[in-house]
């Protein structure tokens, strides 16, 4: 393979030779000698003489060792220095200090060579030889550097050299090939691999030079390199032969038996090794193998070890040749050990390879829920997918599979598992029944009929089991389901208990989800200070954990943005942007519809002209989709008034009609349905019809899906009554609205009708007792939320007649001609025109045209 030598500049530039002694220590086949050969050639090219002694077993006696060393020096030295070296008499027994002194004097005076390389130092075991070499290294002349090459650290007093800074170490990790170096190697043997294949083979061999070279040999003439590399393992003939020749055959029989008995785990603790091998001295054996560089390394702390992956393959194949079932039994034992030591992920891996259906099914049933709660749903899903049919058809396993699919928002897979579950009969016990109920409700929350799921499972009446993980799984689904029914108190109680269990169990992702859900409940209850508190806690919890863009945080961002919008906080758009970035493609319908609606609304508020119209069209598209029928009444009650306002603002009156009809269908006989019809009538200037609906709405015998609607109804009633000259009724309605809104800092209904609301608030300022602070703050800040210089609200909508008049303004017709063309008196037309100017916040025809275009009305 000399033609396949890869010069590695990063290693050629190493500290070899920059200190008195260098030790290159790594397992067989790591490229130690090739590195030093390359370095030595470079030294020779610089005119520096290098003496090289390749040691073998025959050199492990004092006379033979020192004779060979002197011969190597003579071969590299000039003639006069060689004669001095030839005069030396190597000791035949224990090294004599006089010999070492004589040798160093010759080396110092004549300086026959600059470098001395001792290759395969691990072959030296004789105490007499090692003591002598120690003495030489401790008293090297200044002009001589020594490089030691060894498979493992030789039994020399190197710690003294390390303390004095006189030695440089090159280890296996330094010699491991990088992907670029591996790519160069394969090109040199005529096998050009894709970057992906190179990365795979480097990972498979762990950068081990011999493994890469064996792979390169195997690839010679291969028609499908990718397929061959996928099958490149430690039991491949050329790899197995190399490992046997260079590593395994040099091991004592009892050590090889230990390796065979412990080769299944990728990570091996001393305790696990003792369990698998039955050897109380497992730690000592592992430590010795590690020090011998027998492709065994410490992993993590000092009590864990790891066998090289190709070595594990070789051992596993050798184990199976002796007993075909032995690898499976070892995996089963490892699975039980890891399960007992609370490492279920690793236990799953070993149980799967043990091919023991009962063992694997038992582990999934006992550990699956906890793994899902801990963020390991992909592990659970993949383990079940690769298991035997007997495992996949176990009712408990199917339930866990459904929960894992739901955690991953894979509705199709969840439906498949729930359908299979329905065919397996009733649950075997109360815990399985609870988990099955949680899965059914979770699926409905993901996008389905939540009330039906609640009725079918009886989850609202089901007592908790006492198992923390099962109860947490039930509560995190039952809480949001209760919210969908309007039971905010029950939902809060469930989620607060879930938060306690999640914190106690260390389930960080569930903690974040629960914090967000609690924010959702308080938002639905119109308790915006509490919502801001919960969303703040959720965001503060998530960001330090690296979850700022996690889909789990999308709901919290949505609620933070929606709350900011309701209280007049300018950060609404910022939160909307964060929510849309965090939103996953297929998730909870409530979250997806809410986030997309909030983003469209924020886009509308931040843009002008045709961009506004596109934002409204996006909002409408979201709510016209079938998913909109699966969201909570609370979200419908918050979002649809804004949909109506936006549609009217861009002149799409039909869209507003559609939104009102949708609410009538989804929330029949509700306060929300009445309020939104009244909103539409008022926007069209039909105050009598609006007043009639509001009179009905102000009675207390209507279903109310979210408390914010009560504020909106009273705000609109105050405006309508004031417009009809009913001052007392207007103040009564305004007083009720302020009393409901002030504790919640709920400003949005007032802002949306600011053109009519500002004069009404100023008229009655000082009459709201302790709520006057809220009114004063509203008057001070609302001007920043879309109010023109003259106090008219730029967000006020135009009636259909006013919109028709606006669209005639760009024509060359005079106002009188426009009036005649429409069959309306000039005075009526001027009245409508004055209203158009006021609502647009302008004072003339051409300014009205510009404003109409900016707002997407023209």
Image (cartoon, rainbow, N blue to C red):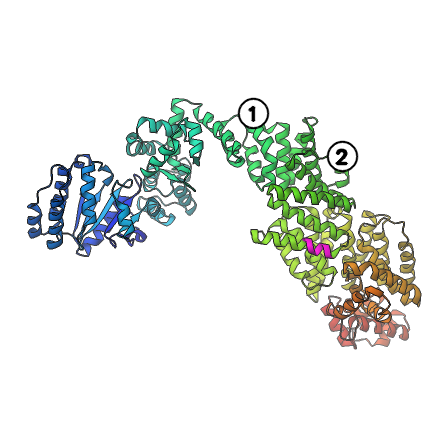
Q: Position of residue 348 (x, y in %)?
A: 53, 33
**Residue 598 colored magenta?**
no
Highlighted range, magenta: 529-534
Check the image and report above or below for 479 versus 731. Answer: above
How would you rate the neighbour count of disc 1 (Cα within 10 Å): few for under 14, some for 14-19, many for 20 or more?
few
Q: Is residue 536 left or right of residue 273?
A: right
Q: Is residue 480 left or right of residue 16?
A: right
- Which is nearer the eye, 205 or 552? 552
Q: Position of residue 566 (x, y in %)?
A: 74, 60
- Which is nearer the eye, 229 or 792? 792
Q: Quadrant of residue 458?
A: top right
What residue sits right under mark 2 in the picture?
Answer: 458
Main secondary structure found in the magenta portion: helix
Q: Quadrant of residue 416?
A: top right
Q: Identify the residue at image location x=65%, y=37%.
A: 468
Quadrant location of the C terminus in the rendered image: bottom right
Q: Position of residue 733 (x, y in %)?
A: 88, 61
- Which is nearer the eye, 269 or 565? 269
What residue sits right under mark 1 in the picture?
Answer: 358
Check the image and report above or below for 263 versus 96. Answer: above
Q: Is residue 731 left or right of residue 644?
A: right
Is residue 144 something one can see in this rendering? yes
How would you rate the neighbour count of disc 2 (Cα within 10 Å): few for under 14, some for 14-19, many for 20 or more?
few
Q: Assign a secondary structure to mark 1.
A: helix
Q: Identify the residue at image location x=92%, y=61%.
A: 688
Q: Is residue 475 left or right of residue 773?
A: left
**Residue 533 colored magenta?**
yes
Check the image and report above or below for 445 versus 677. Answer: above
């Amino acid at each position: 393979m000399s033609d396949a030598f890869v010069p590695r500049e990063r290693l050629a530039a190493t500290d070899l030779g920059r200190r008195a002694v260098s030790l290159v220590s790594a397992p067989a086949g790591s490229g130690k000698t090739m590195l030093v050969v390359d370095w030595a050639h470079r030294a020779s090219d610089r005119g520096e003489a290098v003496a090289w002694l390749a040691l073998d077993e025959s050199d492990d006696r004092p006379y033979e060792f020192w004779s060979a060393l002197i011969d190597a020096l003579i071969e590299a030295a000039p003639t006069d220095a060689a004669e001095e070296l030839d005069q030396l008499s190597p000791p035949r027994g224990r090294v004599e200090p006089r010999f070492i002194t004589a040798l160093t004097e010759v080396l110092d005076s004549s300086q026959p060579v600059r470098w001395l390389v001792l290759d395969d130092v691990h072959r030296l075991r004789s105490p007499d030889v090692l003591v002598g070499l120690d003495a030489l290294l401790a008293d090297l002349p200044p002009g001589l550097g020594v490089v030691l090459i060894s498979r493992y650290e030789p039994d020399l007093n190197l710690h003294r050299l390390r303390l004095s800074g006189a030695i440089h170490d090159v280890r296996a990790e330094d010699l491991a090939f990088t992907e670029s170096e591996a790519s160069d190697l394969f090109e040199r043997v005529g096998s050009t691999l894709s970057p992906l294949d190179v990365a795979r083979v480097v990972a498979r061999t762990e950068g081990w030079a011999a493994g890469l070279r064996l792979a390169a040999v195997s690839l010679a003439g291969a028609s499908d390199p990718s397929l061959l590399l996928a099958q490149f393992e430690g039991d491949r003939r050329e790899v197995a032969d190399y490992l046997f020749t260079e590593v395994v055959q040099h091991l004592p029989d009892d050590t090889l038996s230990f390796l065979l008995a412990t080769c299944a785990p990728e990570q091996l603790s001393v305790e696990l090794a003792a369990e698998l091998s039955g050897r109380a001295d497992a730690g000592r054996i592992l430590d010795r193998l590690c020090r011998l560089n027998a492709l065994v390394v410490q992993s993590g702390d000092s009590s864990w070890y790891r066998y090289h992956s190709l070595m594990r393959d070789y051992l596993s194949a050798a184990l199976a040749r002796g007993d075909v079932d032995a690898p499976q039994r070892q995996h089963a034992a490892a699975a039980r050990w890891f399960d007992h030591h609370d490492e279920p992920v690793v236990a799953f891996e070993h149980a799967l390879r043990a091919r023991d259906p009962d063992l694997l099914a038992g582990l999934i049933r006992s550990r699956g829920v906890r793994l899902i709660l801990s963020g390991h749903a992909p592990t659970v899903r993949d383990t079940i997918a690769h298991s035997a049919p007997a495992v996949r058809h176990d009712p408990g396993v199917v339930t866990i599979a459904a929960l894992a699919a739901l955690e991953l928002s894979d509705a199709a897979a969840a439906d498949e598992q729930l359908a299979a579950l329905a065919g397996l009969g009733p649950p075997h016990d109360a815990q399985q029944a609870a988990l099955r109920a949680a899965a059914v409700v979770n699926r409905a929350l993901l996008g389905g009929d939540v009330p039906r799921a609640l009725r079918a499972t009886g989850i609202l009446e089901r007592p908790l089991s006492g198992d923390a993980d099962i109860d947490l799984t039930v509560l995190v689904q039952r809480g949001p389901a209760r919210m969908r029914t309007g039971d905010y108190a029950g939902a809060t109680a469930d989620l607060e208990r879930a938060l306690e269990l999640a914190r106690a169990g260390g389930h960080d992702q569930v903690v974040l989800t629960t914090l967000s859900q609690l924010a959702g409940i308080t938002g639905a209850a119109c308790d915006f200070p509490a919502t801001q508190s919960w969303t703040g806690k959720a965001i503060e919890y998530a960001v330090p954990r690296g979850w700022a863009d996690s889909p789990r945080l999308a709901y919290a961002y949505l609620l933070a943005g929606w709350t900011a919008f309701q209280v007049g906080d300018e950060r609404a758009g910022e939160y909307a942007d964060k929510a849309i970035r965090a939103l996953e493609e297929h998730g909870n319908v409530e979250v997806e519809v809410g986030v997309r609606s909030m983003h469209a609304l924020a886009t509308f508020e931040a843009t002008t002209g045709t961009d506004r119209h596109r934002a409204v069209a996006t909002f409408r598209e979201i709510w016209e989709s079938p998913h909109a029928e699966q969201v909570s009444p609370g979200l419908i009650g918050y979002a649809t008034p804004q949909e109506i306002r936006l549609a009217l603002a861009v002149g799409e009156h039909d869209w507003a009609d559609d939104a009102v009809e949708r609410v009538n269908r989804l929330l029949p006989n509700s306060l929300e349905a009445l309020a939104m019809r009244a909103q539409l009538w008022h926007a069209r200037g039909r105050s009598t019809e609006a007043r009639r609906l509001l009179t009905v709405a102000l009675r207390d015998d209507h279903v109310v899906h979210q408390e914010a609607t009560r504020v909106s109804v009273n705000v609109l009633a105050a405006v309508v009554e004031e417009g009809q000259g009913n001052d007392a009724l207007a103040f009564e309605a305004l007083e009720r609205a302020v009393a409901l809104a002030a504790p919640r800092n709920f400003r949005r209904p007032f802002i949306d009708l600011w053109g009519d609301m500002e004069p009404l608030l100023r008229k009655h300022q000082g009459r709201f007792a302790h709520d006057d602070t809220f009114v004063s703050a509203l008057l001070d800040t609302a001007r920043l939320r879309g109010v023109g210089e003259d106090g008219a609200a730029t967000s006020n909508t135009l009636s259909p007649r006013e919109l028709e008049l606006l669209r005639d303004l760009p024509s060359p017709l005079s106002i009188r001609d426009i009036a005649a063309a429409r069959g309306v008196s000039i005075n009526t037309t001027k009245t409508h025109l004055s209203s158009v100017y006021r609502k647009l916040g302008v004072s003339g025809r051409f300014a009205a045209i510009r404003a109409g275009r900016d707002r997407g009305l023209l």
